[in-house]
Image (cartoon, rainbow, N blue to C red):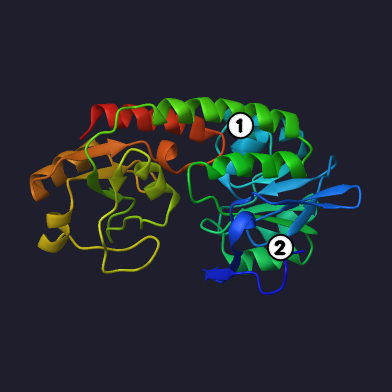
């Protein structure tokens, strides 16, 4: 167990442990058994017979890529990759509005959740009958390595996880080898009515930081702040990225916004920017192309 007095922080009601376990990097040896520590300090032993429900679309994809699809008994309607495989896995609602009775009937042993995507009261209700709750919270690009090893370790797919990590390292090295471009301040938009962006503490912001692009300062201190198109904001930014998800921005939005604000505006693939796990390797290639093209 974590030592008493270990540094913690709160987010959306979750208790997050600081240090190694915060980003899924800690394993401990207890007797002859290895245990794996998740984002809130839960200890997990390896389980080759796990029955998994995943409430995290990007991690559902990662589990499938690690060869664990036969262990997945439930997933959300937003878990759409890999398409041919997830169609065979029972849908149990959305990431926040899950069907608790349906999940109960699936008799899962493990529930995989994420602090940004899932509500703590929902997880607490599921924890009443699911023995093992695996909590994730990757914040930086390289947290994907520890995330893959956490999934591979708990669900006995360590060899495939290590293969995936080697592929990730190759893509990361290619991105790091790019000549450094001009630092830019970019407004990344995820919603309109109301307009919403991402703070510098998010995975998306840390993806963009890999190519020297940073978020502006917002009056709203939330992780996903609301904002107004005022002069103070526009004076901070060099351009705008409109994400294809969760709001479905299109080229028509790009054209209209460019005319409105007089700044460069570009449509970007939200999955490439925000899906950690399997899609992060393609995300690194996408970042490389984004950096080379510029605004």
Query: Dividing the picture into quarters, in which one does residue 150 lie?
Result: top right
Distance between mark 2 and mark 1 Cα atoms: 31 Å
Q: Judging from the image, what secondary structure is the residue with disc 2 in?
A: helix
Residue 54 x %, y % = 66, 48
Q: Residue furthest right?
A: 32
Residue 165 is labelled as 1
Counting every numbered tag in the picture gives: 2
Density class for disc 2 (Cα within 10 Å; few <14, some 14-19, many ≥20) is many
Report the quarter where the C terminus lies: top left
User: Is residue 246 shown to the viewer in this render?
Assistant: no
Examine the rendering and report whether any part of residue 280 can be seen. yes
For marks 2 and 1 on the same chain, the one whose residue lies earlier in the sequence: 2
Percent position of residue 87, x then y: 63, 34
Q: Is mark 1 on a helix, strand or loop?
A: helix
- The residue pinned by badge 2 equals 126
Residue at 39 percent of width and 40 percent of height: 270
Q: Residue at x 31, y 58 (%)?
A: 196
**Residue 12, relative to residue 254: is it above or below?**
below
Q: In which quarter of the image is residue 265?
A: top left
* Quadrant hosting residue 114: bottom right
| Residue in the picture at 56% in, 72% down | 13
In this rendering, position of residue 180 left or right of residue 275: left
């Amino acid at each position: 167990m974590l030592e008493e007095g270990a540094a913690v922080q709160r987010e959306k009601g979750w208790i997050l442990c600081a240090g190694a376990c915060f980003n899924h990097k800690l394993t401990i040896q207890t007797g002859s058994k290895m245990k794996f520590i998740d984002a809130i300090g839960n200890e997990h032993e390896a389980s080759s017979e796990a029955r998994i429900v995943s409430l995290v679309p990007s991690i559902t994809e990662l589990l499938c890529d690690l060869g664990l699809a036969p262990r997945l008994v439930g997933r959300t309607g937003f878990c759409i990759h890999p398409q041919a495989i997830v169609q065979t896995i029972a849908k149990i609602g959305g990431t926040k509005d899950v069907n608790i009775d349906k999940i109960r009937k699936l008799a899962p042993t493990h529930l995989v959740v994420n602090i940004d995507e899932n509500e703590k009261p929902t997880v607490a209700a599921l924890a009443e009958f699911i023995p093992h709750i695996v909590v994730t919270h990757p914040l930086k690009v390289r947290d994907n390595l520890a995330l893959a090893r956490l999934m591979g370790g708990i669900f006995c797919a360590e060899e495939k996880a290590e293969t995936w990590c080697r592929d990730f390292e190759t893509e990361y090295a290619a991105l790091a080898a790019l000549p450094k471009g001009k630092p830019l301040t970019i407004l990344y938009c995820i919603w309109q009515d109301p307009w919403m962006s991402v703070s510098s503490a998010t995975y998306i912001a840390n993806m963009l930081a890999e190519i020297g692009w940073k978020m502006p300062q917002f009056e709203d201190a939330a992780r996903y702040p609301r904002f107004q198109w005022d002069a103070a904001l526009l004076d901070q930014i060099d351009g705008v990225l409109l994400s294809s998800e969760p709001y479905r921005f299109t080229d028509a939005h790009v054209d209209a916004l460019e005319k409105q604000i007089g700044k460069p505006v570009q449509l970007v693939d939200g999955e490439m920017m925000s899906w950690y796990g399997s899609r992060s390797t393609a995300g690194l290639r996408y970042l490389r192309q984004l950096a080379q093209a510029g605004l």
